[in-house]
Image: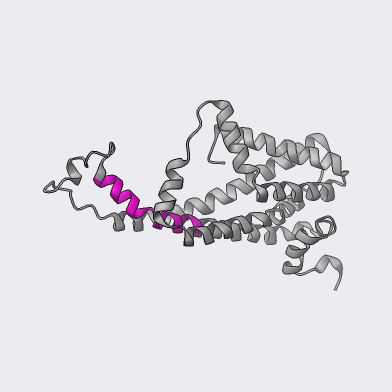
């Protein structure tokens, strides 16, 4: 069997252990495999999101009974009111599919958006290359995000509702453009995010036959643009 016919599993491990050599072996036909990796990350993201949300039910119920100011609920939460019996379990179960779909869709968007930016930036700074092969490579470069989402699943399973509520309450939304950019940069350039950027650098080098410095410039520039775009369009 030739090096170009490596199995899916060996390529996945190769991206982590020997990225420069492995990305050289990835071809356009590997796009489907790259998309499967993104799908795996999306499923893990949806799983984590649903598990976290399942533990927010008691907190939502307590908030509803306390009211928006914490001084007792509004009319429909008061005893004897027409809608006093709010079935939070039903509300939660009906929202679960939307949480799952949102996790899957957002994962694909957050893979595709920086991938397209890498393609566009490489075209400007380096030259022509195979777009299909590059997308296949960015799919493989997304492997660190699978580890991140797996850790989120484990965290969601073990965290208590009280701790989740405390963490959620402690998260402040920054106002102002600079604050938003900093928040997005922190969200993108996590440990796993930085590993993804590094793997994309190897991918650019392999696809465009560029040196390491130019490949790093392309990748970092693309991700900085991505951070700026997320500051204005959080959905990406």
Magenta stretch contains residue 57: yes
- Locate residue 232 relative to residue 170 in the image: left or right: right
Quarter-of-image position of residue 211 = top right
Give me the residue at 40% from left, 56% from top.
55
Q: Is residue 122 visible?
A: no
Please give left or right for residue 113 compared with residue 49 in the image: right
- In the picture, which quadrant includes the C terminus? top right
Question: Where's residue 125, x and y in %?
Answer: 81, 35
Q: Residue at x 63, y 54 (%)?
A: 145
Instruction: Give the residue furthest to the left.
Output: 80
Q: Quadrant of residue 69?
A: top left
Q: Quick check: is 160 in the magenta stretch?
A: no
- Front one among 188 and 38: 188
Q: Can you give x and y, in whole percent of width and height, for residue 75 in the image?
A: 17, 41
**Residue 18 seen in render:** yes
Tell me which segment is drawn in magenta.
Answer: 48-65
Q: Position of residue 118 (x, y in %)?
A: 73, 42
Rendering coords of residue 94 (x, y %): 35, 56
Main SS type for the magenta part? helix
Relative depth, front residue between 150 and 228: 150
In the displayed structure, does residue 116 sit left or right of residue 160? right
Q: Quadrant of the N terminus?
A: bottom right
Q: Residue furthest bottom?
A: 1
């Amino acid at each position: 069997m030739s090096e170009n016919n490596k199995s899916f599993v060996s390529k996945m491990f190769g991206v982590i252990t020997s990225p420069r050599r492995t990305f050289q072996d990835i071809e356009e036909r590997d796009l489907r495999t790259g998309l499967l990796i993104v799908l795996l990350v999306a499923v893990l993201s949806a799983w984590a999101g649903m598990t976290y949300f399942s533990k927010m039910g008691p907190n939502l119920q307590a908030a509803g009974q306390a009211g928006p100011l914490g001084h007792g609920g509004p009319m429909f939460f008061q005893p004897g009111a027409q809608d006093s019996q709010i079935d939070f379990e039903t509300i939660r179960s009906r929202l679960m599919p939307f949480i799952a779909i949102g996790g899957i869709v957002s994962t694909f968007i957050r893979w595709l958006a920086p991938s397209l930016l890498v393609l566009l930036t490489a075209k400007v700074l380096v030259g022509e290359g195979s777009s299909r092969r590059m997308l296949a490579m960015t799919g493989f470069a997304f492997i660190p995000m699978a580890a991140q989402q797996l850790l989120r699943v484990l965290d969601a399973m073990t965290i208590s509702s009280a701790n989740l509520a405390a963490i959620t309450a402690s998260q402040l939304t920054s106002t102002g453009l600079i604050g938003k950019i900093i928040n997005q940069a922190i969200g993108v350039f996590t440990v796993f995010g930085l590993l993804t950027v590094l793997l994309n650098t190897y991918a650019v080098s392999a696809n465009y036959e560029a040196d390491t410095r130019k490949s790093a410039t392309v990748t970092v520039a693309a991700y900085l643009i991505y951070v700026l775009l997320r500051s204005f369009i959080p959905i990406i």
